[in-house]
Each structure stands twice: as structure tokens, then as C-alpha cells.
Amino acid sequence: MEAIILLGGPGAGKGTLSEFLKKQTDFIHVSTGDMLRAALKSGSPVGLEAKAFMEAGALVPDSVILRIIEERISQEAASARYMFDGFPRTIDQAKGLDLLFKNKSGTVKHVFNLIVPRETLLKRLTGRRVCKSCGAVYHLINIPPKKAGVCDVDGGELYQRADDSEDTILNRLEVYEKQTAPLIEFYQKQKLLRDIAAGHSAAETGAAVLDILSA
């Protein structure tokens, strides 16, 4: 059993990279959000425990997240390979993952840190526009509407969500950098961290990761 970890702030391209790697490799994509939703739906003991925290408006503790991870990987063969997206988020989660894999004779092989210039992140994240009437999503650069400010589907008005504003995004990036700095140092010390320039196309980012995986 082995795993790779995808690190990267909002807009770094973790989701796009994970989709690329799913098609090119046998890594099983595991995201924290998907696991939490599955655990809640299953009604398992750990899922119900997580639900209680979420309904109370509290963060799900690291210990519960790790039990959900353990429950998830227990569903696969002992030789499975995992790609963690959005996990771990803290040093305690990283240490817990190490212990979990050690107990299953597994290893974390690589931690890919997606690095994107801040101005590129801002272009990616502030370019999103949403139709007020039907909810269709556009991007001013990647998926522009045929007519500026107008939805192709129903002619509705396109708007920028409050959490896509530059001030909000800059704050999210600062919070991410503060939270992740200790995690980056943790994996650097283990000589697992692989910095990946992810400011170009998704294909280039994916190719860089595949080169490391095949080395």
C-alpha cells in the first residue's frame, strides 16, 4: 500500500491534476470532502460522530478524520495506491497518516506541492462568473460566455460571487499559506516534498508529476 499527497492552495489545480492522474495511473483519488459525505451517508459510527460535530458547527477533530480515512482505505486491497487531495491539513493529521500506513505496511511515497504565482491564482479565481437565473458557471479566460455578462443558456445576467472577490481570495491564500507552512516543512524533513510548477497548462503539470512517479 502506498500513497501520494497533493498540496496546493485555492486555484492551484489539485482537482484538475487528480482527474488527470486518475486517467493515467491506478491511484485511487481520496478527498476529505468526498469521504465525509460518504461517511455521513453510510451512517457508520464514525460517520455519525462526524455528523454531530458538523451539526454543532464545529470542525471535525483530526482523530475522527483519521478514523474516516482508515475506514475508507480498509475497503480496498492491501496493495492499493491512494492519492490524497486536501488531506492532511495539519501536522497531527500528517503524523496520524504516517502511523496508519505504517500499521498497514504502507508508505507515503511523494508529496506534490503545487506552486502557482499569486497573480496567476488571482486570475484563475477572480475570473469565475455565475448566471443569476440558471446557475451556469463561466470563466472570463477559460470558459468565457459568447456575450460579455450574459449567459449562453438562458440570457441571464452573470455575476461574481462574493467569495470570488480579490480581497476574499487574498485572505484565503494567506490563511492557507500560514496553515500549510508547518506541513511543508514536515514533509521537507522527510525528503518527500516535490515542488511542482503548476502555473502553466494542466497537461504540463500532469506530465511533470508523471515523470517523478515513473522515475
Image (spheres, helix red, strand yellow):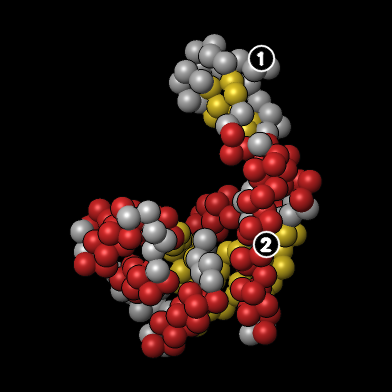
Secondary structure type for disc 1: loop
Query: Label 1 amino acid?
Result: Lys
Residue located 51% across and 61% down the image? 85
Q: Nearer the viewer, residue 164 or 121?
A: 164
Q: Which mark is residue 177?
A: 2
Mark closer to the chain start, 1 or 2: 1
Residue 63 lies, in percent from the top left, at: 38, 74
Residue located 31% across and 53% down the image? 55
Q: Residues within 10 Å of mark 1 (few under 14, many from 20)?
A: few
Is residue 114 in view?
no
Query: Label 2 amino acid?
Result: Glu
Residue 139 lies, in percent from the top left, at: 64, 31
Q: Which residue is mark 1?
A: 147
Mark in front: 1 vs 2: 2
Residue 133 lies, in percent from the top left, at: 47, 18
Above or below for 150 versus 204: above
User: In this image, 167 relative to 38: left or right?
Assistant: right
Is residue 37 in view?
yes
Above or below for 200 versus 212: above
Residue located 67% across and 84% down the image? 189
What is the CA distance from the residue labelled 1 to the residue labelled 2?
A: 37 Å
User: In this image, 38 relative to 195: left or right?
Assistant: left
Above or below for 89 versus 78: above
Q: Nearer the viewer, residue 214 or 110?
A: 110
Q: Residues within 10 Å of mark 2 (few under 14, many from 20)?
A: some
Above or below for 50 versus 71: above
Q: Which residue in the rendered view is the most extreme toward the top?
A: 155
Q: Quadrant of the C terminus?
A: bottom right
Secondary structure type for disc 2: helix
Q: Which mark is residue 166?
A: none
